[in-house]
Amino acid sequence: MELGIIGLPQTGKKSLFELLTGSRPSESGDKAVAGVADIRDARFDTLVKMYTPKKDVPARINLQLLPKIESDSIREGKIFTDISRMDALCHVVRAFKDDSVYHASGSIDPVRDIESVNSELIMHDLIFIEKRCERIEAARKRKADAKLDAEDALLARMKSHLEQDLCLRTFDLTEEEEKLVSGYPFITAKQMLIVLNVSDSAIRDSALMEKLGASLTKLNIEIMQVSAKLEAEISMLESDEEKKEFMEDAGIVQPALNTLSFLAMKTLGLISFFTVGKDEVRQWQVRNGSPAPVAAGVIHTDIQRGFIRAEIMKYDDLIAAGTEEDLKKAGKFHVMGKDYIIEDGDIVNFRFNV
């Protein structure tokens, strides 16, 4: 699955991409840049320290740094083609002031910029619906078709929803309706995360988050803030002690990139589970709501095919107990069958036979 990073010019998209992937993107112009980011998860780090394995493997997410959203890319339409290929979106919004970095609109106004980008995405979906309805009308003139009638009625409702400046991610579809439009490139149906790129002095100020919270919740959009400049300074420190001291001085509980990793996975509809041992500690990703055999299949299809049971330890229970042995003595070791739904943070050992 891929998370597309979008935004207006000079918002800090490249800086964020570099922080997440550890690689500096080249000047790509109108082309998307692919990258892979390790999931930043304190639980994984703790398990590695606890088991001291020979090998540790964090989960990863695939990123695409998409071309900036500006008049040329909008007019040519390629930016929307790039966005439509993504599974979810991360919209980076500039909220920092720096006279040396220009803003296309001449001033810093995150609310305006969010509304501007959302309006362009909504307009894309409206234009698609209008063109599709025209083709449906032409087809119905040639031959009556109940399926086309149903699609036309559905698109009319979706159009009305969009015209209220609402995104399609907040439009409820039945299972049958989903089938009617499943192949269409509706951008506003994708889950979105907004990242406010603030100045380092504003990282503890939640006023903007609170101002935007209600309106973005209505649009089913997650929001967080990060100072790309501050995160870059943290990433350059060598030791954990130095990073901890720096964050304490800045009043930061944990690096914002950890929060960003969590929200990026949530936006993609993913959760983490872990496998642990002296040989390897590994973090895995699976769709939220997946039963145990499906999670087993993420590791290997043979494990899913021969699934017998899942032995589950809850992360918090293990940390509280201190060791697996003490956790078992406390009665917190669970043996679950094929109907068990994997939960975020589960530590799992799959039993199987093939």
Image (cartoon, helix red, strand yellow):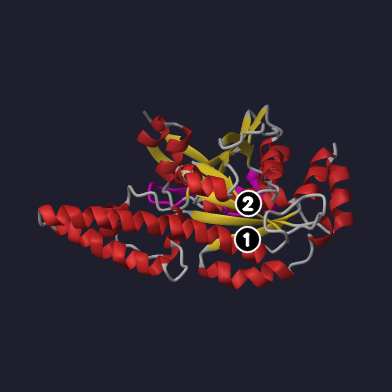
Q: Is residue 24 above or below residue 160?
A: above
Q: Nearer the viewer, residue 257 or 53?
A: 257
- SS for tag 1? helix
* Image side of residue 159 versus residue 45, left or right: left
What residue would you read off at disc 2?
8
Query: What are the residue bounds of the magenta stretch?
Result: 314-341
For the point 56% across and 39% down, the residue is 64
Q: Is residue 115 above or below residue 279?
A: below
Q: Nearer the viewer, residue 329 or 259?
A: 259
Q: Which mark is residue 347?
A: none
* Image side of residue 160 versus residue 347, left or right: left
For the point 71% across and 41% down, the residue is 19
- SS for tag 2? loop
The tag earlier along the polypeptide, 2 or 1, is 2
Confirm whether residue 321 shows in the render. Answer: no
For the point 21% across and 61% down, the residue is 150
Q: Give the farthest residue toward the left.
A: 143
Q: Is residue 332 magenta?
A: yes
What residue would you read off at disc 1?
113
Confirm whether residue 177 shows in the render. Answer: yes
Q: Are marks 2 and 1 in contact (CB under 8 Å)?
A: yes
